[in-house]
Image: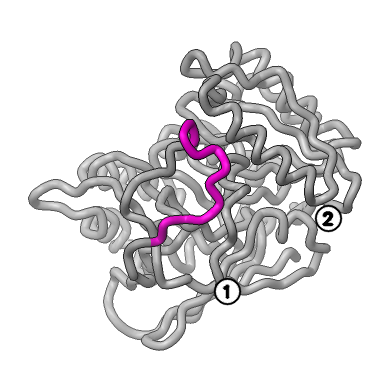
Amino acid sequence: MPVRYPRPLRPGDRVAVTSPSSGVPEKLRERLNVAIRDVEARGYEVVVGACLDGSGHVSASAPERAAELTRMLTDPGIRAVVPPWGGDLAIDLLPLLDWDRLREAEPTWLVGYSDLSTLMTPLTLLTGTATVHGNNLMDTPYRTPDGLVSWFDIVSAPRGHRFTQTPPGRHRTTGWDDYALHPDAREYTLDTPGGWTRLDGGGDVEVEGRLIGGCIETLCNLTGSGCLDTSAFARTAAPEGLLVYVEACGDDALAICRNLHGMRLAGFFDAANAVLVGRTSAPGVPSLSQHQAVLDALGPLGVPIVADVECGHVPPYLPLVNGAHGRLTHTSTRSEITQTLA
């Protein structure tokens, strides 16, 4: 099963907005409007769906959310679907999505992270469609820091495009901007220096493979479901092996350690040539840090483990394309990841 890349977006193309998980509360709607205007300023037409209600824990019923997402992803007139953000219960869409239609349709970009991993990672594994783990719509107005690219750069790139990202050297530790007070926030507060960290020992890392991964707290619930078979994907689409990335949203180190052990035992990392771990602000416990939790669970893999990559919930964001060929470099003087849409 070759990886399917949606055709690159061009000015005039349509970008759809729906919330497959949590919607947008009324007090944050102006931030959503700012983000939509930014997409329109790039020359794209924005189509806003009906599933956006933020008054509860989900934006609409599961059948309504599944139907709208399927419709958008299979509409040949829509070239990208970019939800406002994640949430908690995207998992209830998985048995309701029309996977046959998604396999047969011309591929469409799906962009997001956090609970969107629950949908994007299976979409890549089950249909071969490349998806973008990175900036969600509400992040779109922020200026992209040096060394990184935005989702705009990726979805407008042709098949075969190669791009390299490097850590900007600073990240945020002071929480989040208040979109109710500052809906037009455009500059990240990157208040703390820091780069990537190898957890499994010293030495240079230079390794390649196809990228796949997502949020630990959501993906761990899919093991054994048939939606997270990375080994089958590797056999058919990535004989060179995988670069697997994971990131913790907020669970403490004990929960992350337990979940990663379960994912490893279920075979999620079996084809991994290396593991990238997103930077997290999730707490440790007195006897176990987040780094130690990862090493405890994934150290037995015997592959390089590089942590504090900007692919998690801590700004800024380094987008990773599920299905793209990746080359990871981490030495004492250089850290970078190159992705090729091929």
Instruction: Check contact, mark 2 vs mark 1: CB within 8 A.
Output: no
At horizontal 64% and vertical 68% (from top left) the residue drawn is 339
Q: Is residue 321 above or below residue 226?
A: below
**CA neighbours of label 1 inside 10 A, class few (<14), some (14 to 19), many (20+):** some
Secondary structure beneath disc 1?
strand
Spot occupied by residue 27 in the image (x, y as percentages of width and height): 51, 23
Q: Is residue 334 above or below residue 339?
A: below
Question: Disc number at residue 8?
Answer: 2
Say how the picture is coloured: one colour
Give whichever of discs 2 and 1 has the lower sequence position: 2
Q: Nearer the viewer, mark 2 or mark 1?
A: 2
Q: What residue is drawn where x is 56% and y is 51%?
A: 186
Question: Along the horizontal axis of the image, is 3 left or right of 309?
Answer: right
Residue 18 lies left or right of residue 22; in this view the side is right
Q: Which residue is mark 1?
A: 327
Q: Position of residue 268 (x, y in %)?
A: 46, 49
- Crowding at dot 2, Cα within 10 Å, few <14 / some 14-19 / many 20+, comes out as some
Question: Which residues make up the magenta segment?
Answer: 179-190
Q: Is residue 104 magenta?
A: no
> In this orientation, does residue 246 appear?
no
Nearest the eye: 39 or 254: 39
